[in-house]
Image (cartoon, helix red, strand yellow):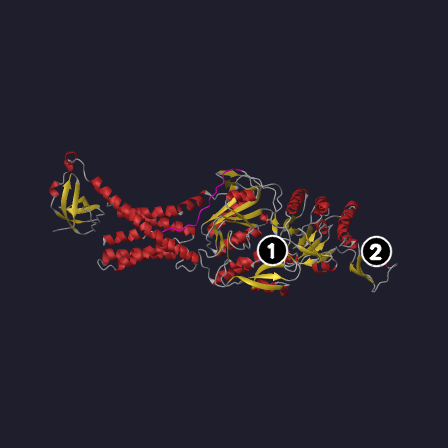
Amino acid sequence: MTKIILILFVLFLIPVNACGQDTETAKNDKTVLPATQIDSSRGVILNITLPINGKSSNAILRTLERTVASLRKSELPVDQDKSGTPIVGSNVAKETDGKNETRPTIILQLNVESDQEIHGGGSSFGACYEIAKLLVSEKFNGIRTVAYLPQPIRGHAMLVVLACDERAAADKTDMGEASIGETNITKTEREAYFEISRKRLTVPDAVVEKMLDSSAVLMRVETEKGLRLLSAAEAETLGKTESFIDCPSVMIAAGEPGIFTAETARKINLISRISNDRVELVRELGFRPDDVRAMPIPGELGHAIRIDINGLINYDKVGAAMRSIQAAVDQKNVAANNRLYSNEKIGFICLNINSPGGDLTASVSLASFLTDTQELKNVWKVAYIPYQARADAAIIALACDEVVLGQGAVLGGDGSTEFSSKDVEDAKETIREIFSKTALRSWSIPVGFVDRGTEIFKMTRTQRPVMTDYFCEEEYNALADSKDWVRGECIKNKGELFSVTGGEGEQYVVDRHAENFAEFKMIYGLDDDPLLVEPGWADRLVEVLSSPGMSLFILYVVVLALAYDSTGLGIGAFIAVVGVFLFFWLNFLGGTAGWLEVVLFAVGVLCVLVEIFLLPGLGVFGIGGAIAIITSFVFATQTFYIPRNSYQFAQARNSMLVLLLSSVGIIVIGVMITRTLSKLSKPKNTDQIEEREKLASYDYLLGMNGKTITPLVPAGRAIIDNKPFNVVSDGDLIERGENIRVIEVVGYRVVVSNDMS
């Protein structure tokens, strides 16, 4: 039976799966956010948080000038179909006087923080005027500017809105009351508003006047030449030269603020379109959502940091990443490159992902954090994937502003966890919200990374601007202009997860490629390595202890402690128990072990004990217990029980290979240790030992019979001549309670055998 126990612990040495590790570590202390390069897109969206003041306006001005310079460097040709019609991908085709012209586009999204009661009011007139002057200057000739208002807007930020070529707003948005919070609008301020609005020739002076002065009256007047919006004085003057079709009516009376709903604003040309989210807006402007770059506006040049997400995704890992990012953007003490940094302005985050996925809910939580956190709106977030970001890990990557894929790296596809239909349905709503409302991407492909039931098609819009995009049936049906789209090939079939491999085939959501981290730094102009924001000491300790090498070492210690406990005092058994506890605890923290594995292990141990002490010789409980223990250790190192996808089958195959090699390795080590102990136990000079140990001579025991009181593995204790002695077996393992005979005595070393013949 002792042999069965030894075989059991030889076999339970199981492999610990691990994904590839990152190849780069931060070396330098400090990195400055470089000037942004827009080398593959002619569409940029800038997030401007209201109110605008002197400090923020300087950053906005610098970013606008830098963006225009980058767009002018990007002179991409317009692709054409067979008929000569421009095909819009990263270029924008706009019909002007019957001709198609390509115009780079800058979208200024004016965001209002949720706790602002006056909808962005409080912006400085001087700061807004400087931005407006730049937007209408010659520097922006050939650049289309679009102001997007997803929330109600008040105050002098309206000056920036008026300075743009086009304006768009969500349907529940209203705008105006530029003078909110001010008792007196100076003549200089009034003339500045008219100067800017007249540059665009789209908003009547009377509308601008009403936004500035609530005491003014805005009249609606219809003549033979059409509908006009005029002040009371203008209406009176016009009546002397033109005939009114109807009597002039008051649109907004004196004393009422000059506020316009989105629908009203569209009718009076204050805005040109109503778009409820950025994805809808950029499509209407002629872009695929993935072809528009999101550009943050940092308050000043900031440092770049790097957050590593390696291995299985779980809530502990996601929580640690969120805490590290939040501490960095809050300018609190940040542990990076073995130093503490405080008050370091962050402008660039590299999310270094190397993960087979894991917990879908945790991944969606991190994606939501990256897109919804207000402090991250002006931080440029880039996901760098050197090896893999499978299944739900791809959701995290797409929540960043850009995705950089290594050569041969995998984005999406089968991962470590096979999600239930309930998990997928619960996550889909949040994913749609993230990517249709917040992130600048379509939501079909992100959902396709985790939902096998989603089919995705390549579709082409036949109406100008012509463009190609990728939709599932549900997103396609939700399009306002769905009738204008023609379905093409299916790029993701049911029953599989969507995936992209770096350098192979169409890249879809991938923005750039990098062979290694050095090339990644070169792409973004990072002279030094980003600050590697490290977890706390407790997180680092757990990460080291739960690494594949450490887990393997723990299991070796457990096996050897049990197999070669020569004290007879149970020290080896104690070490084995501690090792097993540590193994399960670390895998609990790693997200691969649960209570099922613990129960299986306990049942296995119980069966082995029954075999040893209650029903020896049958072998059923021993074999069953061995299988349960082996199974518990296998399950504890992986997220699945039965492999169901290609990734899991590959992991299971690797596990079996490592199991075989590990078993052979531990057998070899065991044989070597046994031989070494046997050689060390044989004295080189028997006469010297007998002289040194003559006071403890046990020669009289030679030939006597006795009984073991502990297992001999190979050493232990036995009763001989009615006295307890430390004894050593002649090579075979001898169980407790067996009859033995002393076959050799050398000094104090008593060798026994269970062969009584």
Secondary structure at numbered mark 1: helix
In this figure, what is the number of numbered marks? 2
Query: Magenta region's main secondary structure?
Result: loop
- Residue drawn at (53%, 44%), measured in percent from left and top? 520
Span colored in magenta = 14-29
Give the residue type that dot 1 points to. Pro
Residue at the disc numbered 2: 234
Query: Is 128 colored magenta in this rendering?
Result: no
| Residue 126 appears in the rendering | yes
Image-quadrant location for residue 229? bottom right
Q: Choose mark 1 or mark 2, whichever is in front.
A: 1
Horizontal relation, residue 252 to residue 706: left or right: right
Picture coordinates of residue 263 (x, y %)? 70, 60
The image position of residue 194, as x and y in percent, is 78, 49
Q: In this rendering, would 38 be left or right of 208?
A: left
Q: Residue at x 84, y 58 (%)?
A: 235
Could you tell me residue 366's position as x and y percent?
52, 52
Q: Which residue is mark 1?
A: 289
Amino acid type, residue under disc 2 in the picture: Glu
For the N terminus, which image quadrant?
bottom left
Q: Is residue 473 above or below residue 209?
A: below
